[in-house]
Each structure stands twice: as structure tokens, then as C-alpha cells.
Image (cartoon, rainbow, N blue to C red):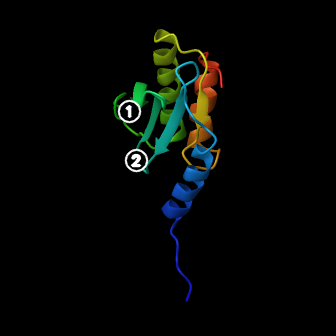
Amino acid sequence: MLKLIDKNQVRIRRHKRVRKIVNGTPECPRLNVYRSNAQIYAQVIDDVAGKTLCASSSLELKLEKGGNVEAAKKVGEDIAKKCLAAKIESVRFDRGGYVYHGRVQALADAAREAGLKF
């Protein structure tokens, strides 16, 4: 009998596989991305200490439409500004198991343009 696996379960398996490699340190924390249908979230995490150093989301920015590419660009710019203010210049990008295109790519590109190094 075939076992049906939905898209989110596949994403979670992919994310676990990537997380074996991508770890955040105090010198180079991890930039994690989570996207839902309506919003997009980003947070910079120090995995050694188990702390979130800074975070941003389309909800926090009070964007009218938080689930599109424009919102992702604004969240990417905001997270980069917060990181630079906290003296974090380089991060490791964790796409959360999502395919690197669309909103995830827009967030990453905006963060790079704002001065964050991956």
C-alpha cells in the first residue's frame, strides 16, 4: 500500500537534511526563513546558545499583503538592517526546506543588497 506524503512533510524532511549541515555560531549565525500562505518570517539564530538574535516578519512590518514577493523584499531589508545594527555582518542562509525561488530568493537577495553577507 502506498503511503501518501503531503508537501509539508516533504519540506520538513528536506529541512532536517539541510540542518545537519547548516549550523549557526556566535560568529556566523543562521538566517532562517519560514513562509506561510499569508506571511513570511525571518530570524537570525545562534544555535550554540539556542537564542534568536534578531527577527523580522511581514506581520511585524504591518504589510497589507504579507504573502508576496514585495513583502519578502521588505522583510529581507529589515532583517539585514537589524543584523547590521547588532554588529552581525555575515550569516548562513537556511531556506527552511523551501525551494530557492520566489519569496525565499527575494528575501535573500534583498538582505544581500542591504549589506548582509552570506
Give percent across and percent down for residue 85.
Answer: 47, 10
Whether residue 33 sits left or right of residue 59 in the image: it is: right
**Image quadrant containing the N terminus:** bottom right
Q: Residues within 10 Å of mark 1 (few under 14, many from 20)?
A: some
Label 1 sits on residue:
63
- Tag count in the figure? 2
Say which of 102 and 52 sits in front. Answer: 52
Q: Quadrant of residue 66?
A: top left
* Residue at x-position 41% and y-position 28%: 52
Q: Secondary structure at mark 2?
A: loop
Q: Secondary structure at mark 1?
A: loop
In three-dimensional space, the C-alpha distance between marks 1 and 2, rounded to whole angstroms, equals: 11 Å
Q: Is residue 117 above or below residue 7?
A: above
Say which of 13 and 58 sits in front. Answer: 13
**Image quadrant containing the C terminus:** top right
The residue lying furthest to the bottom in this view is: 1
Q: Residues within 10 Å of mark 2 (few under 14, many from 20)?
A: few
Give percent across and percent down for residue 43.
Answer: 45, 31
Whether residue 90 sits left or right of residue 4 in the image: it is: right
Label 2 sits on residue:
38
Give percent across and percent down for residue 24.
Answer: 55, 30
Identified by mark 2, the residue type is: Ala
Say which of 102 and 50 sits in front. Answer: 50
Whether residue 20 sits left or right of residue 44 in the image: it is: right
Identified by mark 1, the residue type is: Leu
Q: Quadrant of residue 55?
A: top left
* Residue at x-position 57% and y-position 35%: 23
Give percent across and percent down for residue 78.
Answer: 47, 22
